[in-house]
C-alpha cells in the first residue's frame, strides 16, 4: 500500500540541494544552492514578459546578465542565505571572470534542473 505524504511533511522537507564549487579565480570555494520553485520563476521571469498572451523578451538584449543573475540567485553562505541581493551587486558580479561564473552556473543549472533547452526557450521569447 502506498503511503502518501502530508502537506506538513512536504513543506517541512529540507529539499534544496547544495554543492560546494571550487572557484580558483576567486581564491576559494562558494556554496551553490538549488533554486526554489519561486526563485526559479522569478529568475526566468526577469528575462521575459507577456504581451498579447505571448512570451516576449524583456528587452532586445536576450540573455544579457544571465550568468551573473543565476550565480547571484544561487550563491549562498553557510546558513543558506543568498549573498548577492542588490542589482548593483549582481552587476559587479557580472564583471567577474566568465570562466568562474560559468562554473557556478553549471552547478546551479544542474541542481535546479535548468536545462539548455530551458535557456533556449528564454532566448526565443
Image (tube, rainbow, N blue to C red):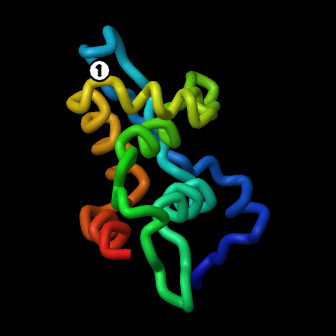
Query: x, y percentage for residue 40?
Result: 52, 58
Q: Quadrant of the N terminus?
A: bottom right
How many numbered dots are placed on residues in this image?
Answer: 1
Q: Residue at x 50, y 33 (%)?
A: 90
Name the element at disc 1.
strand
| Front position in the image: 88 or 84 | 88
Q: Residue at x 56, y 63 (%)?
A: 41
Q: Quadrant of the C terminus?
A: bottom left
Seen as rendered, the residue at the extreme left is 99
Query: x, y percentage for residue 26?
Result: 33, 14
Residue indicated by mark 1: 23
Quarter assignment of residue 52: bottom right
Quarter assignment of residue 79: top right
Q: Residue at x 27, y 68 (%)?
A: 120
| Front position in the image: 17 or 89 | 89
Seen as rendered, the residue at the extreme bottom is 52
Query: x, y percentage for residue 112?
Result: 43, 54
Query: x, y percentage for residue 97?
Result: 27, 25
Q: Residue at x 54, y 64 (%)?
A: 45
**Vertical arrangement, residue 9 with respect to residue 85, above or below:** below
Amino acid at each position: 500500500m502506498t503511503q502518501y505524504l502530508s502537506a506538513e511533511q512536504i513543506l517541512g522537507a529540507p529539499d534544496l540541494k547544495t554543492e560546494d564549487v571550487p572557484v580558483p579565480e576567486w581564491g576559494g570555494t562558494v556554496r551553490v544552492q538549488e533554486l526554489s520553485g519561486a526563485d526559479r520563476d522569478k529568475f526566468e521571469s526577469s528575462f521575459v514578459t507577456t504581451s498579447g498572451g505571448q512570451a516576449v523578451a524583456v528587452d532586445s538584449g536576450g540573455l544579457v546578465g544571465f550568468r551573473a543573475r543565476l550565480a547571484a540567485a544561487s550563491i549562498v553562505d553557510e546558513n543558506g542565505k543568498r549573498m548577492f541581493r542588490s542589482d548593483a551587486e549582481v552587476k559587479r558580479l557580472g564583471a567577474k571572470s566568465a570562466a568562474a561564473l560559468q562554473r557556478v552556473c553549471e552547478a546551479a543549472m544542474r541542481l535546479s534542473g535548468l536545462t539548455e533547452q530551458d535557456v533556449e526557450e528564454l532566448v526565443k521569447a
